[in-house]
């Protein structure tokens, strides 16, 4: 399955505008191609295209299982939540629920690993 996944940090319901440097530090060692805000990442059994901006990131064309672990690690480092299309918001650190915009955190789910994230996304898609 291919997913479009958004990553973003929040502070008092607004974009935190931070975290990109932390996410880049996690992803860059695994990027085989970088062009401005675009990185093509290869990790373990798969790869992903990521579009990294100061205030968030979009990831798509994610193949395999292991790249999901890298994406979750990056989100944890950046203090970003994970927002797949047609799924609840996934929290990667304590205190994030309280920082989300009103109504966004009601169905938010804590996630600690890529395997857990994929399982929850796939469960939501069925």
Image (tube, rainbow, N blue to C red):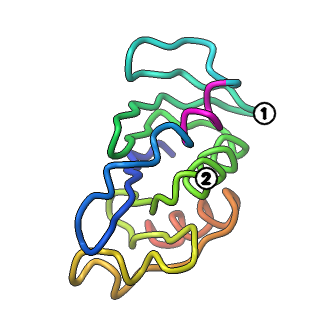
Is 21 left or right of 103, judged from the image as shown? right
Picture coordinates of residue 7 (x, y %)?
A: 41, 52
Please tell me whether mark 2 or mark 1 is closer to you in this view: 2
Q: Which residue is mark 1?
A: 44
Q: Magenta residues?
A: 23-28
Picture coordinates of residue 32 (x, y %)?
A: 63, 13
Cβ–Cβ under 8 Å for marks 2 and 1 = no
Q: Residue furthest bottom?
A: 106
Say which of 25 and 119 sits in front. Answer: 25
Is 102 left or right of 120, judged from the image as shown? left
Say which of 86 and 5 sits in front. Answer: 5
Q: Is label 2 in a helix, a strand or a loop?
A: helix
Q: Which residue is mark 2?
A: 77
Kindly identify the residue that appears in the image at 32 percent across and 64 percent down. 86
How many callouts does the rendering have?
2
Kindly identify the residue that appears in the image at 46 percent across and 47 percent down. 19
- First in residue order: circle 2 vs circle 1: 1
Mark 1 crowd level (few <14, some 14–19, many ≥20, 10 Å Cα):
few
Kindly identify the residue that appears in the image at 43 percent across and 37 percent down. 60
Picture coordinates of residue 119 (x, y %)?
A: 62, 66
Residue 57 belongs to magenta span = no
Specify the label residue 121 is tagged with.
none
Mark 2 crowd level (few <14, some 14–19, many ≥20, 10 Å Cα):
some
- Say if 100 sits above or below 73 in the image: below
Picture coordinates of residue 83 (x, y %)?
A: 39, 60
Is 67 left or right of 56, judged from the image as shown? right
Kindly identify the residue that appears in the image at 37 percent across and 50 percent down. 6
Q: Is label 1 in a helix, a strand or a loop?
A: loop
Say which of 65 and 50 sits in front. Answer: 50
Q: Residue furthest right?
A: 44
């Amino acid at each position: 399955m291919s997913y479009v996944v958004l990553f973003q940090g929040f502070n008092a319901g607004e974009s935190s505008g931070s975290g990109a440097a932390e996410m880049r530090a996690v992803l860059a060692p695994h990027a085989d191609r970088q062009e401005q805000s675009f990185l093509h990442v290869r990790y373990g059994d798969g790869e992903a295209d990521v579009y990294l901006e100061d205030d968030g990131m979009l990831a798509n064309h994610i193949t395999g299982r292991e790249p999901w672990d890298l994406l979750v690690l990056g989100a944890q480092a950046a203090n970003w939540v994970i927002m797949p299309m047609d799924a609840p918001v996934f929290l990667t650190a304590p205190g994030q629920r309280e920082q989300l915009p009103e109504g966004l955190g009601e169905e938010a789910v804590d996630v600690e690993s890529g395997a857990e994230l994929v399982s929850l996304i796939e469960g939501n898609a069925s």
